[in-house]
Image (cartoon, rainbow, N blue to C red):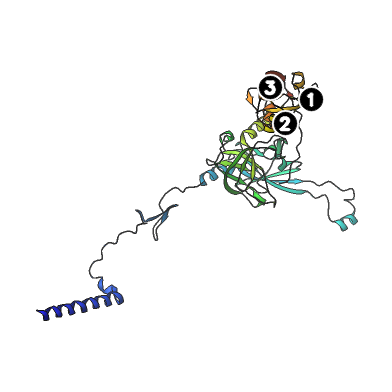
């Protein structure tokens, strides 16, 4: 019996050794008969598509499934056809010696036009465009290049330097117009796309978020309430579109904060709600009519409130009142604190300026003020404000 067990053990050992050698050197010898179906890898799903964290990817040798891609391609497709490139020519001042051939020999040709470039947005199918005032300021000729390659000469309908906006018209119809959104519904953190013609390289789309709202005090225009975004905006983007995730226009790109001339992630856009009001006024009246009451305001700081023992902590301090101006005639005095204008609370100089500017000239408005311990309501006859050209800071 013991002899039989030894023979069996030795035979089993030899058989396992042979199987190991064959499996290592000639594994295909072991695939006898029909092959069993292999299970799909764990990352492979039905239809031959491998799943990943970014969506569905086609498997090797398979066709891509009809799965919508995530992202902002739909928004870009909706808005990009309405964004145009703007090229301007501005004639240099003519030197009195320009016709002297000796002058040209030493100093070269003079009086040749300078060229500028920017962007614009088609806002109506019959040829109305929005852009920045500084893009077309003093332009002798304005050429528009559409996204489809067509080129056409534009005329200026009107401009408003105090908001840095301009309305142009081109002699074309059935144009792709952008849908106007509502900038008042934007929130910090909302995704936005900036579409324009940076550095004149051609139409470009960049993405970012709304970084801040109501930015003012930048010295770019008189009436400032900018949308701040980190979407890349560069020289040439001025006048282009800032659109939301649905492709609706929410702002007109106007400036960047930069120490190098390129984008540093801080760009500013004029809210579309402001642009719509300016465009309507320019089309209807040929100018933007704004209210004015003749006061010198100052922001009310906590230190000022504490030092002068003021009865209110919010509002706008009036430091000066123009003699015989609307506010003077309405009874306002230096030291008054304006709390509200026509029922709209004001907490900063920018808010006061914008709220008064929105009042219709020629009509009275009620102002809630605080004079010492007494709350009062004054009636002021608003008059039309004379335009004042702001000093625009370089980009």
Which mark, by number, is residue 349?
none
**First along the sequence among labels 2 and 3:** 2
In-front residue for pair 159/164: 164
The CA distance from mark 2 to mark 1 is: 15 Å
Q: Which residue is mark 3?
A: 369
Is 83 rendered above or below residue 12?
above
Location of residue 327 by image quarter:
top right
Q: Residues within 10 Å of mark 2 (few under 14, many from 20)?
A: some
Q: Position of residue 360 (x, y in %)?
A: 69, 23
Crowd band around label 1 with a 10 angstrom C-alpha radius: few (<14), some (14–19), many (20+): some
Estimate the x, y position of residue 7 in percent, counting from the top left. Answer: 14, 80
Determine whether label 3 and label 1 are within 8 Å by CB.
no
Q: Which residue is labeled 2 in the image?
A: 298
State if disc 1 and disc 2 touch (CB < 8 Å). Answer: no
Q: Nearest the camera: 300 or 173? A: 300
Closer-to-camera residue (129/366) = 366
Residue 170 can be seen in this image:
no
Check if mark 2's residue and mark 3's residue have beta carbons within 8 Å: no
Q: Kindly identify which residue carries mark 1.
A: 322
Position of residue 323 measured from the top left corner of the image (x, y, whole percent): 80, 22
């Amino acid at each position: 019996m013991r002899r039989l067990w030894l023979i069996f053990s030795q035979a089993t050992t030899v058989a396992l050794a042979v199987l190991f050698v064959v499996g290592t050197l000639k594994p295909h010898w072991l695939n006898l008969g029909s092959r069993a179906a292999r299970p799909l890898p764990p990352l492979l799903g039905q239809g031959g598509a491998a799943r990943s964290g970014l969506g569905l990817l086609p498997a090797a040798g398979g066709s891509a499934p009809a799965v919508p891609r995530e992202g902002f391609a739909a928004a870009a497709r909706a808005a990009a056809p309405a964004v145009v490139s703007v090229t301007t020519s501005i004639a240099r001042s003519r030197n009195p010696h320009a016709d002297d051939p000796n002058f040209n020999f030493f100093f070269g040709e003079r009086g040749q036009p300078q060229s500028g470039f920017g962007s614009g947005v088609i806002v109506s199918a019959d040829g109305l465009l929005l852009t920045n005032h500084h893009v077309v300021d003093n332009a002798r000729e304005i050429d528009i290049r559409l996204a489809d390659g067509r080129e056409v000469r534009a005329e200026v309908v009107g401009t408003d330097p105090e908001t840095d906006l301009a309305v142009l018209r081109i002699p074309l119809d059935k144009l792709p117009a952008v849908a106007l959104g509502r900038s008042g519904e934007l929130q910090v953190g909302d995704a936005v796309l900036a579409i324009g013609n940076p550095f004149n390289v051609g139409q470009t789309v960049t993405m970012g978020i709304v970084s801040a709202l109501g930015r003012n005090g930048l010295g770019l225009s008189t009436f400032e309430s900018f949308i701040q975004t980190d979407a890349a905006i560069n020289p040439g983007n001025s006048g282009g579109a800032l659109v939301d995730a649905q492709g609706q226009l929410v702002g007109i790109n106007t400036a960047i904060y930069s120490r190098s001339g390129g984008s540093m992630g801080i760009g500013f856009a004029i809210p579309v709600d402001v642009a719509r009001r300016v465009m309507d006024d320019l089309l209807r009246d040929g100018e933007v009519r704004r209210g004015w009451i003749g006061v010198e305001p100052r922001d009310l700081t906590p230190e000022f409130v504490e030092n002068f023992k003021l009865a209110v902590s919010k509002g706008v301090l009036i430091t000066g009142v123009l003699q015989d101006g609307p506010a003077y005639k309405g009874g306002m005095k230096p030291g008054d604190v304006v709390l509200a204008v026509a029922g709209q609370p004001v907490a900063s100089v920018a808010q006061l300026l914008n709220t008064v500017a929105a009042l219709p000239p020629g009509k009275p408005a009620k102002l809630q003020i605080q004079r010492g311990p007494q709350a009062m309501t004054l009636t002021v006859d608003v008059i039309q404000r004379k335009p004042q050209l702001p000093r625009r800071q370089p980009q």
